[in-house]
Amino acid sequence: MKKQKRGKVKQSLKELARERIKTLFKHAETVSPEAGRKAVKRARDVGMKFRVHMPKDVKRKYCKKCDSFLKPGVNCIVRLNQKKQSHIVITCTKCGAVIRMPYKK
């Protein structure tokens, strides 16, 4: 059996990690806020262990400060800011973190 170099992860393991992250986020949507937070934490741990970037659609669904799954109207406030640079402002009600995402008109 060949020995892998230190820090290298096989591509097949990365694909499995991406699938696991997506399934954990699907689970986080259906359960209570506390169980959702644990699922998001586990998904982030999997991503860091296998050096996988979070998919763009998943990255916007959780608070990076407190790891809570964001559900508009339940535990976050979503607003549109249409001044010079149009962007969406998402505020986590648990920790108060602010996430800004630009959008085109």
Image (spheres, grey):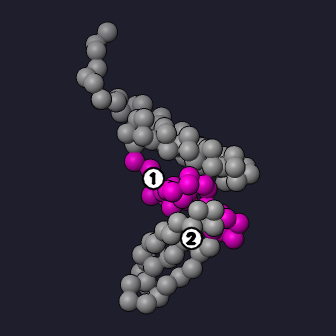
In magenta segment, residue 72 = yes
State whether residue 30 appears in this view.
no
Image quadrant where one finds the C terminus:
bottom left
Residue, x 41% and y 81% (percent of image)?
104
Residue, x 45% and y 72% (percent of image)?
101
**Horizontal and vertical percent position of residue 98:** 50, 69
On screen, residue 17 versus residue 8, left or right, reads right
Residue, x 69% and y 71% (percent of image)?
73
Inspect the image, locate mark 2, and give the three-letter code of the amino acid beneath it. Answer: Thr
Contact flag, marks 1 and 2 (Cβ < 8 Å): no
Image quadrant where one finds the N terminus:
top left
Of marks 1 and 2, the one in the foreground: 2
Residue lying farthest top? Answer: 1
Please say if 83 is above or below 42. below
Residue, x 27% and y 24% (percent of image)?
6
Span highlighted in magenta in the image: 53-76
Please say if 30 is above or below 60. above
Identify the disc placed on residue 10: none
Residue lying farthest front? Answer: 95
**Horizontal and vertical percent position of residue 10:** 35, 29
**Horizontal and vertical percent position of residue 12:** 40, 31
Where does label 2 land, which residue?
A: 91
